[in-house]
Image: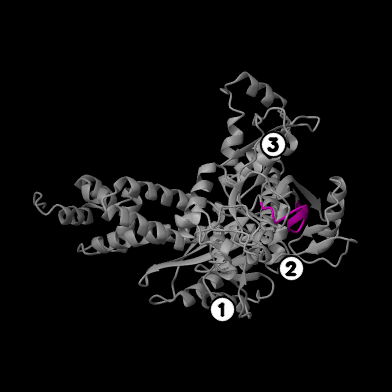
Amino acid sequence: MNPQLELQLKTLSSDPGVYRYYDKNGQLLYVGKAKNLKNRVLSYFNKNLSGYRTRIMVAKIFRLETTIVPSEYDALLLENNLIKEHQPFYNVMMKDDKTYPWICIKNEDFPRIFMTRTMIKDGSEYYGPFAKVRPARVLLDTVRSIYKLRSCNLNLAPPKIAEGKYRVCLEYHIKNCKGPCEMLESKETYDKKIDAIRGIIKGDFRQARNYLVDEMQAYAENLEFENAQMVKERLDLLESYQSKHTVVNPNINDVDVFGMTSDETAAYVNYFKIQNGSIIQSYTIEIKKVIEESDEDILEQALVEIRQKFNSDSVEILLPFHLNFEIPGVKLIVPKVGDKKRIVELSEKNAKEYRIEKLKQVQIVDPERHTNRIMAEMQKLLRMPEEPRHIEGFDNSNIQGTNPVSSCVVFKNGKPSKADYRIFHVKTVEGPNDFASMEEVIYRRYRRLLEENEPLPQLILIDGGKGQLSSAVKSLKLLGLYGQITVIGIAKRLEEIFFPEDSIPLYLDKKSETLKILQRVRDEAHRFGLKHHRTRRKNSTIKSELEEIPGIGDKAIELLFSKLKSVKRIKEAPLETLEEILGKSKGGFVWRYFNPDGNNLS
């Protein structure tokens, strides 16, 4: 297995999607779908793989490509389209080469609604496709039973109806049709029914569901339980029907789609080629930034290069944002809503997933480069004069003001440096006052670093909002360090980043690596502080109990703890041990306190 394929296998997404295997000559070997891409693809490289044909194929795999889609159903449809378009050698082709069925609303007067496997470009509307025929039939039967539609193929143009050429048929008499052929139903009324049916096909089942529930209850009340069960099955199938899919949409025809994401060092551009309503090509590329080019400049460059690479002559291009750029005879569109918007969002998602995979690969192969990139990103997002190679995070821990401690955790190059962690016992603050506690601890920490000529951090992170941040700033000003060190606060509820003298917080992308590091520093400071707070509170409780012993002072208590470590051991210690630690007199006081029923000592 080549090293690049090994890296790809380690960084696969767990989303649903389609995977494609290529040999070393670039020949497409196989297209497959997966509910979880990572689990499915890795299963091919299991040592216990069964099947001679499969083992031969896996031995030829040199390169892997994936496309992320919204659901397993979409993966099924995209897989079908790619197999039919490219006919990979190892895929089992359907013998009759049938496509999935669609529901068609015919472009005609008093439109018919029927199921078809063939799309004709005559202005008709097609909905689907359906992976199975039965849900499509149930949907058709349901709408026909709710809205009585014509099933004949007569040309019901108004002049022909006006001439009286048609007569109602049996369907009218058995109440399956309202007789539009004799104008017993107006075109306006009929078109309203078609609009309602469009809603049902697109997923608005409320009216159809209510109709079926009433019908089922009516059968049940008449003790016609078999009929009631049949209606229930139709209702269950209707509710499981998935109506709209981003992957295949006949209204998006012969179009190029581009999605993009970027960071400080590179941009990632995804390209979809859509023909006859189906994605037939997916390609993603990484473009290194040389002189901090804008996203617009990079997308313009990528757009031209990718269209040339795939010899695209599509006259419509869907983009995630506007470009100051024109291609003669080609429309550049930034969709705002609907299916075209969703297909652009899907392209952007694929670009983002590609970026994540690349970053994971870099982290494995070149961790130093990975760290450098994150540090550069943090410097930019947090408006810092230099990279935050040394970060210190602070948090206060107390319960109703008792046993207050403040923790200081240190991160170097984005990783915890636990040897540098510090705990501060708050000395000058009475009661629960986080602001005053933060002010004291920040002052003590950085006064000491200055006195000992120790290196200062580039970034100080305060767990809390504006109040705690202002307290930290006050101490930094007293020490003459304000402006030399970047200091920020992070509020947990909305993960708001606060800067001194700025009332508007910064909101980072939830997937941002900068935010993840800040959250980790904050959480580590909280964990470390809480751990020591609990220990101090426990020791304080124990110490209070020992302080009740007559003749035993603080020094004696500290000496006992230094030797026996816990109150349990002190209680269980024999007289000889206590006398050895504290002397005969005080040792006897402690032993008699915990052993009131013991022998009276002289």
| Disc on res. 198 | none
Element type where label 3 sits in the image: helix
Q: Residue at x 59, y 20 (%)?
A: 51
Q: Quadrant of residue 49?
A: top right
Residue 491 or 419: which is nearer the viewer? 491
Q: Is residue 123 left or right of residue 474?
A: right
**Mark 1 vs 2: CB contact within 8 A:** no
Q: Nearer the viewer, residue 589 or 485?
A: 485
Which amino acid lies under the numbered mark 2 shown in the image of this protein? Pro
Locate the N terminus by quadrant: top right
Query: Which residue matches tag 2?
Result: 385
Percent x, y of residue 42: 60, 33
Q: Tell me if residue 335 is in the magenta stretch.
A: no
Query: x and y percent of residue 208 in the render?
Result: 45, 59
Q: Mark 3 — residue?
A: 83
Q: Give the crowd class for mark 2: few <14, some 14-19, many >=20 residues within 10 Å.
A: few
Say if 126 sits above or below 67 in the image: below
Amino acid marked by disc 1: Ser
Classify mark 1: helix, strand or loop. helix
Circle 2 sits in a helix, a strand or a loop, which is it? loop
Q: Quadrant of residue 510?
A: bottom right
Q: Which residue is mark 1?
A: 470
Q: CA distance from mark 2 to mark 3?
A: 53 Å
Q: Is residue 268 magenta?
A: yes
Taking the image as shown, residue 530 lies to the left or right of residue 462, namely left
In the image, is residue 358 above or below residue 315?
above
What residue appears at the point 44 percent right and 70 percent down from the top-left corner?
A: 426
Whether pointer 2 and pointer 3 mark residues with C-beta atoms closer than 8 Å, the reply is no
- Distance from disc 1 to disc 3, alpha carbons, whole Å, reads 62 Å
Q: Pick the residue in front: 46 or 136.
A: 136
- Start and end of the magenta stretch? 249-271
